[in-house]
Image: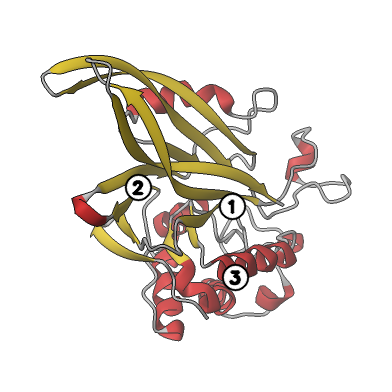
Amino acid sequence: MAKIPFNVRAAARNIHLVDLDCTSKQNEWWFLLSGDRHHDNPHADHALELKHLEMARSRNAGIIDVGDMHCAMEGKFDPRRNKAGIREEHAMAPDYLDSLVRYASDFYAPYSKNFVVIGRGNHESAILKNCETDITERTCERMSQISKCKVHAGGYGGWVRFNIEMHKNERYSLALKYFHGAGGAALMSFDTLKIRRAAAVTPDADVIVQGHVHKQWFMPLSRERLVCDRGGARIVSDIQYHVRTGTYKDEFDDGHAGWHIEQGRGPEVQGAVWMRLFLAKRTSKTRNGKPDTKYTLTPEFHLAH
């Protein structure tokens, strides 16, 4: 199997640096942007998860997960517990939370080298608050032990910075901000109204990735920028990309009953989002009219179904 064409380093507890390998044969890099897997829920689509995990392995792609890998609502003292909400693998386990960690880490460990970071969602945060155990950290630790490959746990929010260094000291980078998400499902707007707020508070991000609302889309936002260089200044426009990662949980099923149905919500598309990074060549003119060629590390997005 080919070597993964990137290396992950932790710069802080929720900042991870991804150094991209660049060769004549390696000029693009793929990453699966996922979230809200709810892996221990009976309605989680494990077959679709495996399909995308295998695609990631075949592409030597990275995986950035933005939280709610676990559902974790069926503990003995959890007021949200529901007999219909527990998989048979955990139904008789005397150590429910330990069982979730074992179950998830066994499932994901074969793909450990692909994971860039696994973030925390509101489901994991609730367990940390009420049960004083960090199931995200524990899952990453056990995956690392099984695979002998470091798996990084992230935060509820954090950053991933992609870096590439070419010949002649040419360096390029792209900054990705991830945040699990907040608020409701936004039935009419599909959560698109939040992108202006996110852009305002996170101006340094080239890509902003969120989950939580179980919507799946990507949207470009054009921005006006002032660039000062070589003693002068010019106005340019660039693009900040906003992504919602989707979910692997089918909450609708046949529409018979359940919290999702009681809220008047319909079926959701299951899946995630692929991000392809590549070096794009851009030629512009300098103040004196001469051509100026530069490269940018550029993202391209595709829905993963």
Q: Check disc 2 and give the amino acid type.
A: Gly
State which mark lies toward you, 3 or 2.
3
Query: What is the C-alpha distance between the residues marked 1 and 3?
Result: 23 Å
Q: Check disc 1 and give the amino acid type.
A: Asp
Of residues 117 and 252, the one drawn nearer to the viewer in this rendering: 117
First reached walking from the N terminus: tag 3 or tag 2: 3
Instruction: State whether residue 7 appears in this view.
Output: yes
Query: Could you tell me residue 80's position as x and y percent?
Result: 63, 53
User: Judging from the image, what secondary structure is the residue with disc 1 in?
Assistant: loop
Question: Which residue does the numbered mark 1 point to in the structure image?
Answer: 36
Q: Hey, which residue is sitting farthest left in the picture?
A: 231
Judge the density around disc 2: few (<14), some (14-19), many (≥20) Cα neighbours within 10 Å. many
User: Judging from the image, what secondary structure is the residue with disc 2 in?
Assistant: strand
Tell me whether the residue at label 3 lies in contact with that at label 2, contact meaning CB atoms closer than 8 angstroms.
no
**Res 158 label:** 2
First reached walking from the N terminus: tag 2 or tag 1: 1
Of residues 78 and 121, the one drawn nearer to the viewer in this rendering: 121
Of residues 266 and 147, the one drawn nearer to the viewer in this rendering: 147
User: Judging from the image, what secondary structure is the residue with disc 3 in?
Assistant: helix
Left or right: where does residue 163 sit relative to residue 59?
left
Instruction: State whether residue 15 appears in this view.
Output: no
Left or right: where does residue 205 sit relative to residue 211?
left
**Res 203 label:** none
Query: Could you tell me residue 204's position as x and y percent?
Result: 30, 33
Quadrant in the picture for residue 205:
top left
Q: Check disc 3 and give the amino acid type.
A: Ser
Tell me what residue is drawn at x 62 percent, y 50 percent: 272
Tell me whether the residue at label 2 lies in contact with that at label 1, contact meaning CB atoms closer than 8 angstroms.
no
Tell me what residue is drawn at x 35 percent, y 47 percent: 158
Question: Which residue does the numbered mark 3 point to in the structure image?
Answer: 58
Tell me what residue is drawn at x 74 percent, y 59 percent: 43
Vertically, is 228 above or below 212? above
